[in-house]
Image (spheres, grey):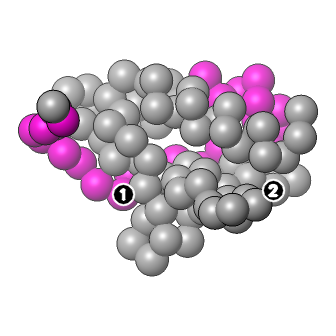
Amino acid sequence: MGAEAEVYAIAERVRQCPGVVGLSGGLFGTVATYLPGGRLMGVSANDRTVEISIVATPDRPLPETAAELRRVLASLAGERKVNVRIADIVEDIVEEV
């Protein structure tokens, strides 16, 4: 799997995790992957670590959400450490019409 496909696969798994509203670049947008034509906010991966930054809901304990993310990313991360940042917590999710 190429680097671009890998970060998109990571982002997709993160977005599907219960307790995750979405990805975030963090306070200064430092958690991102630069790709041709733009950047993917909320995911950064190198040969040692996978860094993700999320917006979470308070529906489940944050340590549970982080542990779940590490579990679902294990097959993509391999031997790399998975760091989870909680950039924000959103209580009310507004549905777009």
Name the one closer to the observer, 32 or 56: 32
Q: Amino acid at mark 1?
A: Ala
Taking 61 as reference, is 30 above or below it?
A: below
Q: Residue furthest toward the bottom?
A: 28
Q: Is residue 74 left or right of residue 54?
A: right
**15 part of magenta stretch:** no
Identify which residue is drawn at 15% across, 31% down.
97
Name the one closer to the observer, 64 or 3: 3
Identify which residue is drawn at 68% across, 32% down.
9
SS for callout 2: loop
Q: Which residues are drawn in magenta?
A: 70-96
Identify which residue is drawn at 26% across, 26% down.
60
Q: Position of residue 39 (x, y in %)?
A: 62, 61
Q: Which mark is residue 69?
A: none
Identify which residue is drawn at 52% across, 33% down.
14
Residue carrying label 2: 46
Taking 85 as reference, is 26 above or below it?
A: below
Q: Which mark is residue 87?
A: 1
Q: Position of residue 53 (x, y in %)?
A: 48, 52
Residue 92 shows in the view:
yes
**86 part of magenta stretch:** yes
